[in-house]
Image (spheres, rainbow, N blue to C red):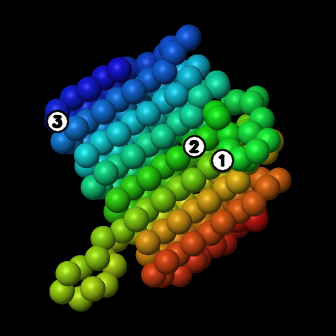
Amino acid sequence: DLLAGNNVTVGQAITTSEGAVKIVATSGSITTDTDAPISATKDVTLTAKKDIATSDDISTQEGNIALTAQTGAITQGGEISTNSTVDSDIDTGAFPSGNITLSAATNLSQNANISASKGDVSLIATGAIDSDTEAYVSGDITMAVGTSTSVSGDGDISYKAGRDLVIDTLATPDAVSLTAENGAITVQPLAVL
């Protein structure tokens, strides 16, 4: 685990052969450099008070991946993937591992692919409201041109934006849920849905 009161910069690769990775910036932001992939066998958790910006890949074999920007934005620059082989619970339908969750308080930019073998993929941008105009000033989720989100086995894909949602290629044998609560949904020109 890596816990810091201010900003956290991951400047080199982090690899675990039998464990989880947890990085917390209690009052600042988290940044990963272009030559700093994170690879684990169990859960990978990044939690920042402010922003999260990743520039290299994040992956796990049998865990979940969760990125949470409590008051800020998430900018995903490296691929995110899970490779779990565990089936969902027969009663609840929930996956114990293999899930990918990105949750931002303001905006979320997906600039690289997201993939899961089995598990649910959820991207959330809550958004903030201007107290004077009562209009949303953030809450956008944007998939860059040419990016994709996929589940090759079982699992749902969910995008929930407080304002606008721009999507590209989405692929899963199960359900896809797209929500732009106070805006519009736009599909990139070459997207495959």
Residue 133 location in percent, x, y?
23, 88
Query: In percent of the image, x 44 and y 72: which residue is there?
Result: 162
Please state which amino acid type lies under the numbered disc 1: Asp
The earlier-in-sequence mark between 1 and 3 is 3
Residue at numbered disc 3: 6
Q: Are marks 2 and 1 in contact (CB under 8 Å)?
A: yes
Residue 1 visible, this angle: yes
Q: Nearer the viewer, residue 27 or 108?
A: 27
Instruction: Work out whether 135 lies above or below 39.
Output: below
Residue at numbered disc 2: 100
Report the mark closest to the observer, 1 or 3. Answer: 1
Tell me the element at label 1: loop
Tell me the element at label 2: strand
Identify the image quadrant of the C terminus.
Answer: bottom right
Residue 68 location in percent, x, y?
39, 46
CA neighbours of label 2 inside 10 A, class few (<14), some (14 to 19), many (20+): many
Identify the image quadrant of the N terminus.
Answer: top left
CA neighbours of label 3 inside 10 A, class few (<14), some (14 to 19), many (20+): some
Please state which amino acid type lies under the numbered disc 2: Ile
The earlier-in-sequence mark between 2 and 1 is 2
Query: In percent of the image, x 34 and y 62: which residue is there?
Result: 106
Label 1, label 3: how far apart the Cα atoms are: 31 Å
Residue 116 visible, this angle: no
The earlier-in-sequence mark between 2 and 3 is 3
Please state which amino acid type lies under the numbered disc 3: Asn
Label 2, label 1: how far apart the Cα atoms are: 6 Å
Residue 141 location in percent, x, y?
48, 64
Residue 95 sits in quarter: top right
